[in-house]
């Protein structure tokens, strides 16, 4: 993302953060830091692929926590074992995939969509400049294209073309940046903290219902988090995730919420009592949306919530009628709650 446009020369805070942090990462990273960044990203990517196939692998070797993998790699002499661990994880995944036999179109498309998003995220970090629709972070669009009558041979060819383009860009971009660490880190953290505080305040005013450290309305909390974090990639991802969650909240409010619900969507899935949700449904959702999607299943039945947060939240919904502290849910609803919990 460019800070200056040749036409309008507008500055965006997120773009400023990205530019400075990316430069700091490239200029200051030792061989181990770069190796561990790559190791952690590959571990997270492989985790999501295994999850899409319901392989059932257990943490800590298998998890979607980038920082956990990165910290393990950076500890002691673990970096020297990273390549071996990656190979072992890949072998486990291949064994799981082989045990499934010939994959269904649904499973093939789950993997295709995940890899398409993962490849695009790396391309964005590298600044490859690839364009949509082939290159995008929209998991649903990739999944829909794959499921929309496309032959699997065409799907595999498209995935291979994307991998080739990414490898070429990776080779071209493998150059050290020129900006030093130090003062630039503080400038970046000032930008990061101010933007985090601004977005958190807007989300609170809109009634988005977000919670957790990402949404604390404190400049110092965000600034100190930025200063202490060892990996600028994590800061970039955190800033981008916050921005995306807020945009999703506003988008939902504009189509189905409104002032009466505090800017929150009336439903996440109005039909979750009638159809089984899928990974493609849940992958794009924020933590707040997952929470709402899970709880609206019992709220639809008139469940009287135990927590003040849930009671206050659903009291805004025009359809909610609290009638009982015990409710009965059908098999589809039980399955949907279990799937949502696996994403929370």
Image (cartoon, rainbow, N blue to C red):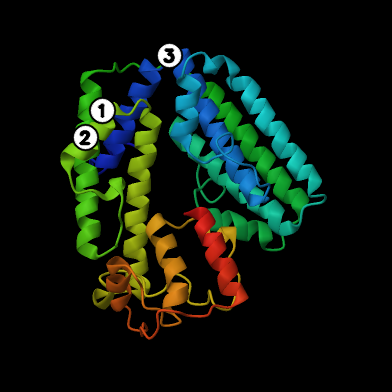
Name the residue beneath numbered marker 2.
223
Does residue 14 show up?
Answer: yes
Q: Position of residue 273 (x, y in %)?
A: 54, 77
- Asked whether the beta carbons under mark 3 and mark 1 sit within 8 Å of each other, the answer is no
Disc with the residue nearer the chain's start (3 vs 2): 3
Q: Residue at 63% of width from left, 35% of height from top?
A: 163
Q: Secondary structure at mark 2?
A: helix
Q: Earlier in the sequence, mark 3 or mark 1?
A: 3
Extreme right residue here? Answer: 101
Q: How many residues crowd around disc 1 within 10 Å: few (fewer than 14), some, or many (20 or more)?
A: some
Mark 1 and mark 2 residues within 8 Å of each other at the beta carbon: yes
Seen from the viewer's position, the closer of residues 172 and 96 is 96
The image shows residue 47, relative to residue 126, as above or below, that is below
In this view, the mark in front (3 or 1): 1
Q: Which residue is identified by label 1?
A: 227
Mark 2 Cα shell of 10 Å, populated few (<14), some (14-19), many (≥20): many
* SS assignment at label 1: helix
| Classed neighbour count for the residue bearing mark 3: other residues with Cα under 10 Å, few (<14), some (14–19), many (≥20) | few
In this view, the residue in front, 127 or 66, is: 66
User: Which numbered disc covers residue 324?
Assistant: none
From the viewer's perspective, tell me whether residue 248 is left or right of residue 194: right
Using the image, tell me which numbered label, if any, was put on residue 30: 3
Q: Position of residue 298 (x, y in %)?
A: 45, 75
Left or right: residue 311 versus residue 330 is left
Cα distance between the residues tagged 3 and 1: 18 Å
Q: Residue at x 51, y 20 (%)?
A: 35
Residue 276, located in which quarter of the rendered image?
bottom right
């Amino acid at each position: 993302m460019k800070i200056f446009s040749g036409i309008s020369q507008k500055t965006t805070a997120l773009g400023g953060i990205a530019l400075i942090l990316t430069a700091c990462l490239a200029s200051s990273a030792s061989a181990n830091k770069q190796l561990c960044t790559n190791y952690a990203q590959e571990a997270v990517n492989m985790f999501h692929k295994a999850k899409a196939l319901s392989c059932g692998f257990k943490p800590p070797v298998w998890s979607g926590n980038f920082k956990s993998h990165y910290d393990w790699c950076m500890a002691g002499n673990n970096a020297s074992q990273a390549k071996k661990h990656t190979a072992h994880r890949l072998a486990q995944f291949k064994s799981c995939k082989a045990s499934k036999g010939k994959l269904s179109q649904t499973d093939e498309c789950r993997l295709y969509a995940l890899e398409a998003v993962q490849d695009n995220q790396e391309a964005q970090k590298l600044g490859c400049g690839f364009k949509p629709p082939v290159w995008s972070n929209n998991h649903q669009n990739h999944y829909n294209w794959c499921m929309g009558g496309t032959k699997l041979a065409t799907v595999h060819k498209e995935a291979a073309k994307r991998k080739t383009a990414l490898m070429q860009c990776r080779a071209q971009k493998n150059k050290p940046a020129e900006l030093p660490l130090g003062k630039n880190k503080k400038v970046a953290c000032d930008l990061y903290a101010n933007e985090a505080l601004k977005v958190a305040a807007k989300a609170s005013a809109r009634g988005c219902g977000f919670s957790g450290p990402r949404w604390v309305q404190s400049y110092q909390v965000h600034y100190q988090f930025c200063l202490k974090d060892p990996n600028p990639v994590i800061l970039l991802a955190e800033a981008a995730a916050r921005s995306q969650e807020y945009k999703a909240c506003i988008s939902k409010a504009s189509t189905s919420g409104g002032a009466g619900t505090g800017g929150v969507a009336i439903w996440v899935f109005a039909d979750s009592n009638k159809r089984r949700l899928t990974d493609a449904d849940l992958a794009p959702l924020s933590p707040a949306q997952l929470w709402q999607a899970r709880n609206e299943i019992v709220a639809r039945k008139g469940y009287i919530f135990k927590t003040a947060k849930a009671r206050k939240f659903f009291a805004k919904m025009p359809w909610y009628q609290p009638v009982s502290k015990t409710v009965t849910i059908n098999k589809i609803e039980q399955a949907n709650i279990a799937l949502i919990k696996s994403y929370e």
